[in-house]
Each structure stands twice: as C-alpha cells, then as structure tokens.
Image (cartoon, rainbow, N blue to C red):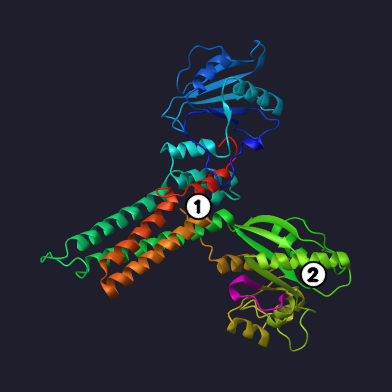
Amino acid sequence: MASNVPKASEPPKASGLATIAAIATPLGRGGVGVVRLSGARAYDIACTLTGKSAFTPRMASFCRFYQADGTVIDEGLVLYFKGPHSFTGEDVIELQGHGGMILQNQLLARVFELGAKQAGAGEFSYRAFDNDKLDLVQAEAIADAIDATSAAAASSAIRSLSGEFSKKINQLLEQLIHLRLHVEAAIDFPDEEDVDFLSDGVIQSKLEQTQDKIQQVLATAKQGQLLRDGIHVVLAGRPNAGKSSLLNRLAGQERAIVTDVAGTTRDTLQETVVLNGLTLHLTDTAGLRDTEDTVERIGIERARTAITQADMLLMVYDVTRDLEEESTPLQLAEQLFGELPEAKRLLIIANKSDLLSDLIDDSSSQIPSVSQIVIKERGYEQVNVSCETGAGIDNLVEALCAKVGFHPPENSLIARTRHIDALRRTADSLAEAHEQLTVFQAGELVAESLRQAQNSLGEITGAFSADDLLGKIFGSFCIGK
C-alpha cells in the first residue's frame, strides 16, 4: 500500500481518468468499516460488486458484496453520491461493511479486481480541490480536524472547513485587485487632468486599510497556529530540581519516575497535555551537570539537543539549594545553557517555594530578593511553584500562555505555518508598495509590489500554488482522504 502513496514533492494526480479506492476508516476491529471509491467507474463497480442494477443517489441500499465466484465477502450499506454533487465532484461510492482488517482488505481487493486503483495519500481531497469543491485552506482543515489535540482546535478547524478563513482571505484578495486596478489606471492614463490617482490620497487610504486588515488576519492566524501546533516546552535544570515532578503535575499523572537519587532521569521523556486550551508538547530532560557516567552523559547530550529545539524553556531550580551565595537565577541559566537564552523563550521556575513560605510576599506571590528585581529589570520572569503541593501551577500555565501570546478569541480559526509566512510576505509587499507610493510616487513599482502581495495571499487558498507545495500538503493526508 505504501508504494502507492505519492512522494511529498509530487501532487496526487486528479485527472479523473482513474477510479480510485481506499479504506476510509482506521484498520482494526470495529462496528463499521468503510471503503470509498471516486471516479467515472465507481457506480459500475458498485453494481457488479453487489449484483444490483441501479442505486438512487443519496439513499442507503442494503446489499451483499460478492467475490467473482459468487461467494459473499460481507454485507452492508451502499451510498451513492452522483457527481458533481459529491465530496470530490466525481461519482462517489461508499461501501459500509463490518469493521475488521480481513473483511475490509478483502472488499478492497475485490474493488481493485473490478478496475479501481489504490488512492494515494490525500487524493480524494486533492480531487475535491481540483474540481473546485474545496479551496486549499478547507482541504487542510480536514486533516487539521482529524489531528486536533483539543476541543478548541477541532472547532476552529471545522470553522476553517466551512469557509470562514477562506472568506477573509478572498475579501482581502478583492481589495488588492481593486487597488491594482486604480494603480494601473494611474499608469495608463497619466495625463488625465481631473484627478491625479497617485497623489489624491485615495489609493493611499485604500492601501492603508488593506494593510490594517492584513495585520488583523495575521493576528488571528497566529492564534490559530498555536491552537493547531501547540508549543514545544523543555524542562531543564540541575539534577533533582523537580523537573520530573513538574512534568507529572502538568500531565496530571505519574509519567516520570521521581526519586531522591540525582540522575534518575537519563533520557528525554515526552508528554502532550492541553492546558487552558493550549497544547503543550512537554519534554523532561536529564539534569545538567558534569558526570563520568556514560549513560547519564548520553542523556545530557540529548537534553542539550532538546533545549536548542524548544519553543519555550522552563528552567527549574530548587530554591533551597541550587543558588549559591550571591548568585542569581539568571547566572544559573548562563551556567546551565552556556549562554543566557532570550527572555521570550525562557521562563524561570522556582520549585519548592513552599519551604520558603515565611519569605513569600503574599501580595506579589514572589520571593522578595535582589535577584528577583534583576530578573524583572532584564525582561525575564520567574514563577514560584511547589511540585509537592501544586501551589503556583496555575500561575505557571497562565505565564506560559502569556509568554507565547496565546489568547484565542471564541471564533478563532485554525492556521498553519505556511499561512503565517504567506501573510507576512503579503504585509511586506504592501509596506513596499506604501513606500513607493508615498515617497517616490512610482506607479510601476507600486503595481509590482501589489502583484507580489496578491500572489503571496493567493497561495493560502490555492488561487496561486506551485505543484511542489500541493504535493507536500496533500501528501501529509490519510489514505482514504
């Protein structure tokens, strides 16, 4: 089956010449298993498979599915969706039999005998895109809905699938086209005396309005990207600082082994949790120290690799022992990581703060000290927690969300990294157009910048897409989608 999956650099073929088929439900034991067909021969294959002469569109028919020699493979329902009124825009047949690897594979093999070909990854969705049943954002939203790790991400993906994100992009495209028409008119009719298009302020006003809208959509898309992808958080620090205990607290279960023996954690341990709607891909790491233990050294090397790849670092330290006299948490961070990480990707976690409760200022929930003042002055943040009692964990989650700017609106929309990149390139091209217009009054350069902006924005919905981009997108889909 894997040999039939298109390479990521090659978009699936949606010529409509071949009828494709695939199992559309997860393999395994279950109540129902679905085999899906799409293409010109789907209807005829279903008739031969069942011995029926006709099917009514959008009505379920109970049938038996037969081998060539007349023996029964399975029995179940047949659903017929006549093109173009179907998901792919072609004739689509769904064979709903009993779940189970043997039965589904026997049914699929029989469908292949009757002339269907194995569908590639994402080929059904690609045909829907190719036949204008979906745009690229909606097609991606199908995979995002399936892969959602939280209820918020799932509902956002469904909103994108329904076309809300596409509508925003298409409205911006219309504005850009309208702008280009004005600029082209200014270039083509430079001698008109009644109006000077490039200096009367109309184009500048419309351009600035479009720039504002792009920034609004970009802000929404950034929230959508966080909903979809979450953030990769690495817990790092000295041995026995409480990293594994913190992982267990955040995960809500005993995922990591915790002992009083330094060096218990010798490898990275991953766990994914959803807190306050934000998906956190947590990685617990070996304590950072000099050691002669070969196994522990390998774990520390893996820890340092994880640290370089993290979106956010939680430096966990034991307030009762990890800071030497006159040292600060920032100096500890420099010792552990070789250099001080940027403030935007480092959150300092003071563990065992309950043991210093007599020093805690209740009004600020912070340990008052010179080092705390230094942390704030340099733009860093410390959160005091107790992994033993759970105190401060809610504050930690809130601080994480604030650090990455996660505050999705109720009607947020799912977004991907490529959407963010396309929106940023669009914004850059519009900024160039604004400069060419207001500083140089160069109509031709304004028009070129607007054209580039339109192409970048069109990449999001697929109005302008390279084949290699389509291959990467649809090649990541499930077989059967």
State the image coordinates of residue 387 (x, y, percent, origin top left): 74, 67
Q: Secondary structure at mark 2?
A: loop
Q: Quadrant of the C terminus?
A: top right
Gap in angstroms between the C-alphas marked 1 and 2: 36 Å
The quadrant in which the N terminus is found is top right
The residue indicated by pointer 2 is 287
Q: Residues within 10 Å of mark 2 (few under 14, many from 20)?
A: many
Is the residue 175 above or below the residue 103 in the image? Answer: below
Residue 325 position in % (x across, y down): 77, 88
Give the residues drawn in magenta, as a range.
Answer: 337-347
- In percent of width and height, residue 117 lies at 57, 28
Q: For the residue marked with disc 2, what is the amino acid?
A: Gly
Choose between 35 and 191: the one closer to the eye.
Answer: 191
- Using the rendered view, name the quadrant where residue 291 is placed: bottom right
Q: Is residue 424 visible?
A: yes
Q: Amino acid at mark 1?
A: Ile
Residue 387 in view in this figure? no
In the image, 274 versus 189, the foreground residue is 189
Residue pointed to by mark 1: 414
